[in-house]
């Protein structure tokens, strides 16, 4: 069993930061781990993980994505390069990892490549998630030269029929041709990066293709293929049309999958005519007394920034009404990071872990109403945890 002298940290990442002489990042990582382990509500440490959304719109219409489904819970915007540069000026010295992704298609922002290069200038590990449609040879060269560490390409099928069932408006031939183009450009430029990963979300209509995914991905130039169980909305018909029958690739039990959520998260959820949200709190999370509760690391270690500068509690909160504030790099970061919303999030999660509190579905605070505390933690990429000498 790996042990560390520093609470709340991974000894492999500690070794990696020491080896790379990233002293500021290491000191902040250790401080954040210590503050999280003791349930601190007001922090001196800064986030070491950043999810930033370059563009909050997309060409595809994936039905379970708020953007693709047109739920309009967040305004469309494009992140400006000068805004991103100010963010890096405030946080770059302590950031360890950055995701370029969230509710839109990052490649629709022409400044994306400069943003990645700016992040790499601050020695930040970078990942991009994309549908790889807004792409050509020039884009492939810019992406390789940007220094990007990993690109995740979402391809949920091995034919146009299975792929476009979820990636509505997508072109299977185009995305696979672009994957080959990127792999070829990486080889041409004699670059080890970006690592190319094919992501395959499993649904009922494509689960028969699972065994062929990795072979297909490697043949097209990807380095790896990830088979991922998909999150599904609780709505009538979802179980029969979308939920896989293979239990190892489903997040839900087929027989007990509900046709509606036990409560309404927000007004954008479908409701029957005349239906009203529940007037009393619904207990949606009750851990077994033997089950250890783990904290969510977002309020201590992670930041989710939208293109307009608004800051979400985490990368899973769609609605703007639950934002914790705005940060565009011009004001003091501490004022946002230790505001009332963040301190309330940390207090609730710490109490939840100690079994002094439960989720409160009708709360106006996103973290209090969350029923996935400890289950939606971001994970440090394995490539940062590997020893390379």
Image: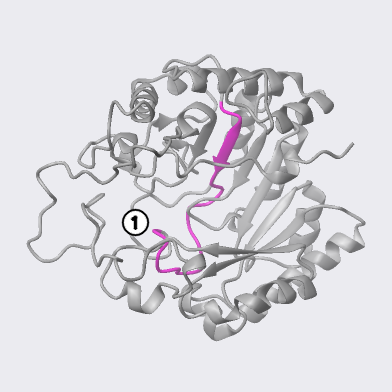
Residue 291: where, in percent of width, then height? 40, 39
Q: Residue at x 33, y 41 (%)?
A: 287
Provide the residue designation for mark 1.
72
Q: Is residue 189 above or below residue 34?
A: below
Q: Quadrant of residue 88?
A: top right
Q: Is residue 167 above or below residue 70?
A: below
Q: Residue at x 34, y 62 (%)?
A: 233
| Of residues 37 and 109, the one drawn nearer to the viewer in this rendering | 37
**Dot 1: few (<14), some (14–19), or many (≥20) neighbours within 10 Å?**
some
Q: How is the image coloured?
A: one colour
Disc 1 on helix, strand or loop?
Answer: loop
The answer to whether residue 23 is left or right of residue 229 is right
Quarter in which the N terminus is drawn:
top right
Q: Quadrant of residue 156?
A: bottom right
| Of residues 347 and 333, the one drawn nearer to the viewer in this rendering | 347
The answer to whether residue 344 is left or right of residue 59 is left
The answer to whether residue 185 is left or right of residue 265 is right
Q: Residue furthest left?
A: 274
* Residue 164 is at least partly visible in this image: yes
Total marks placed:
1
* Residue 331 is at least partly visible in this image: no
Magenta stretch encompasses residue 126: no
Residue 290: where, in percent of width, then height? 38, 38
Residue 222: where, in percent of width, then height? 76, 66
The region drawn magenta spans: 47-66
């Amino acid at each position: 069993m790996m042990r560390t002298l520093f609470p709340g940290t991974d000894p492999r990442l500690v070794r990696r930061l020491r080896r790379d002489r990233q002293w500021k990042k290491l000191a902040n990582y250790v401080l954040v781990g210590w503050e999280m382990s003791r349930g601190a509500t007001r922090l001196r440490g800064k986030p070491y993980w950043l999810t930033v959304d370059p563009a909050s719109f997309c060409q595809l219409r994936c039905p379970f994505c708020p953007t693709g489904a047109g739920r309009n819970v967040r305004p469309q915007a494009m992140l400006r390069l000068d805004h991103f540069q100010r963010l890096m000026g405030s946080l770059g010295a302590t950031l360890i990892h950055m995701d370029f992704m969230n509710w839109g298609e990052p490649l629709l922002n022409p400044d994306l490549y400069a943003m990645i290069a700016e992040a790499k200038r601050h020695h930040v590990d970078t990942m991009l998630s994309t549908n790889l449609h807004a792409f050509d040879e020039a884009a492939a060269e810019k992406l390789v030269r940007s220094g990007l560490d990993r690109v995740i390409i979402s391809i949920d099928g091995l034919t146009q029929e299975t792929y476009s069932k979820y990636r509505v408006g997508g072109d299977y031939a185009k995305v696979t041709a672009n994957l080959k183009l990127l792999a070829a450009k990486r080889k041409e430029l004699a670059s080890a990066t970006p690592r190319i990963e094919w992501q395959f979300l499993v649904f009922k209509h494509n689960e028969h293709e699972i065994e062929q995914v990795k072979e297909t991905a490697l043949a097209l130039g990807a380095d790896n293929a990830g088979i991922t169980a998909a999150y599904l909305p609780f709505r009538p018909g979802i179980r029969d049309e979308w939920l896989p029958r293979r239990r190892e690739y489903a997040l839900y039990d087929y027989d007990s999958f509900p046709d509606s959520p036990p409560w309404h998260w927000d007004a954008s959820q479908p409701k029957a005519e005349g239906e009203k949200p529940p007037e009393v709190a619904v207990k949606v999370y009750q851990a077994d007394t033997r089950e250890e509760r783990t904290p969510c690391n977002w309020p201590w270690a992670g930041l989710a920034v939208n293109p307009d500068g608004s800051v979400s509690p985490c990368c899973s909160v769609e609605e703007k009404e639950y934002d914790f504030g705005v940060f565009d790099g011009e004001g003091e970061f501490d004022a946002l990071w230790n505001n009332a919303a963040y301190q309330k999030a940390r207090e609730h999660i710490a109490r939840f872990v100690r079994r002094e509190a439960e989720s409160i579905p009708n709360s106006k605070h996103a973290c209090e109403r969350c029923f996935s505390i400890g289950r939606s933690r971001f994970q440090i990429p394995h490539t940062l945890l590997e020893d390379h000498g």
